[in-house]
Amino acid sequence: MSKLRTGVLGVFPHLDTATAAIRRLRKEGFELTVYSPTPRHEVEEALGTKESPVRIFTLVGAFTGTAAGTALATWASIEWPLVVGGKSIIALPAFSVIMFELTILLGALSTVAGLFILGRIPHLGPAEAPMYHPSFTAGNFGVFAHAPRDRYGDVQRIMSESGSEEVLVDQR
Amino acid sequence: MSVVEPSTVTRSAFHPDVESYEQVNRDAMRLLTRPGKGYVALLAMSVALVGLLVFAELHNIIYGLGMVGDNWAVMITTFVFWVGIGHAGTLISAILYLFRAPWRQAIYRFAEAMTVFAVLTAALFPLLHIGRPWFFYWLLPLPSQRGIWPNFRSPLLWDVFAVTTYLTVSSVFFYIGLIPDIAAARDSTTDPMRKKVYGILSLGWRGTDREWRHFTRAYLFLAALATPLVLSVHSVVSWDFAVSIVPGWHTTIFAPYFVAGAILSGVAMVVTLMVPVHKIFRLGAYFTPVHYDRLAKLLLLTSLIVGYAYGMEYFMAYYSGELYERDVFWDRVTGDYWWAGWSMITFNAIVPQLLWIKKIRQNLNAFFIISVFVNIGMWYERFVIIVPSLSHSYEPWKFWNMHMTWVDASLLLGSFGWFFMWFLLFLRYLPGLSMAEIKEVLPPPMKHHAPEQLAHDEAEMVAETLPTGYKEREVR
């Protein structure tokens, strides 16, 4: 699913005006890209965002780690069985440390992989929305409506009515 | 006084002096500009100490480990000390995140940076003490040329897994948390070189809804994974000792005792770093009395746990009736190392009790001094565990006395140089205040009405009353 490459960007210094614009634009059927300096539940609620599937990556990574830890310690011990300190060759209490650490390690790394794949980080190629403003990492919220050129007027009207301080139009 | 629209002046109970989202960015970016003479001097000193470390290590490589004191005592002590320091950073960044403690946001970046650099410092010592550091890969789970794998039943191998996992996960957690702030630095810096570097490091972050949606979840799961990890790491380090049969080491109390001690030392180091940074950069709007109050209480709690563990060790030595155990513990406070034993007890279990007094808790200078004492005390704790126990083991003819050589001292001092070098470089080049996360605890800018969520936040904050009596006012 790729979004339209043209559209209008509204700069909102306030959260409530941004969420109002998001709600109205969604009602009109526009696809949106919302910029915010900090994660806010209000934005997610206005956008109707679903739970992120990153957790599946975490779960699969963590269990892979447990399995890998068990397999590595067991297999390496059987490969060349040496009795050390009178312990049994497959000593699960001792191996539990290896299993635990690899659970965490692979769980964490696959969580990051999930974030990078799903969040499209690092950004290579054209960005999701063609317009951006540096103030979005400082204090402003940004709403980019992916719209065809003939609907720019509608979007601009909704944005200024909702309280956008500045409406920028993609001229390309 | 500037006139502000009444609808926009809602202030956070935690950061009453922070007016807006933009101010957070301005203040955070202020840290990245204009290093003073003091900074350059400190950095030069740290680099000089790193030079000392390199020199001592070259001596080790050329002449062998003969100049490293008996049983690598100082190296192992310093290794455990630095691993422990790291723990408070993860406690603050991950555990307090899961507890949704709102006083975490302003201080966690410093604490987390401290964690990463402390573990980086600790990681030096296993490499240095093996004598031929270029064979460090023998530690890794790889078969030798005869097809023999490392012994997975050995606590030393567990330690390799625990410490490398900890270093990896805490670095990843640190970097992921930094991404939105590096993007903010990229957007506000005017220096073209910095803009370019921050641009690469921020991985094209723009704060879109897609990015935040996955970021917040991923961050939560990383915190959830880091929490048991941090508790496991010092437990595993403690098992390096506890699994052996040396009197004074072979106790089941070691894991919780080490973890509590680690958090005590880490919180102390956080305070030791925070107070000067606070004073130099005038960060009173972010490091408020509430933050120090909470840190003091954390320090007090862990100090009580550690004090309890000290008492319990003596009780068990007495109650077990074990001759060697009793002898070692008696020797710790009356033998050749009585000074180390008493330093440990005084600095870790007695001095922090001053924090029960509210006046002391809220006096930054007093708190700073107490934190330095705890740092010293925690180094002594590891020293006391390692040296007197080994030097006073089963056979009287094997008793020995530790002599600190210049190589030991150089490695110890050098480790501080190495740690502070990274920390100072971090302060200058990466955002030390988490801009995105501090904004989470600020009320969002509103034009018309307060959101429903704010009312909920406010109710939570009623319980978080600011302690009174904090005299310092920042010049803004």
Image (cartoon, rainbow, N blue to C red):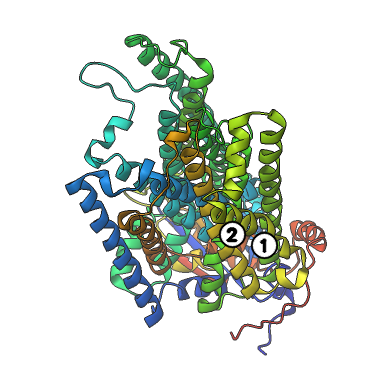
Q: Which residue corresponds to the image point at 57% horizontal and 36% vertical from the top-left? A: B248
Q: Amino acid at mark 2?
A: Val
Q: Which mark is residue B174?
A: none
Q: Are marks 1 and 2 in contact (CB under 8 Å)?
A: yes
- The residue that mark 2 highlights is B374
Do discs 1 and 2 belong to a common subunit? yes
Callout 2 crowding tier (Cα within 10 Å): few <14, some 14–19, many ≥20: many
Q: Is residue A121 visible?
A: no
Q: Position of residue A158 (x, y in %)?
A: 60, 62
Q: Quadrant of residue A172?
A: bottom left
- Above-or-below relation of A127 to B245: below
- Above-or-below relation of B100 to B229: below
Q: Given the current orientation, which residue lies at the most extreme front position?
A: B397
In depth, the one of B255 and B176 nearer the eye is B255
Q: Position of residue B193 (x, y in %)?
A: 28, 69
- Label 1's element? helix
- Above-or-below relation of B415 to B272: above
- The residue that mark 1 highlights is B351
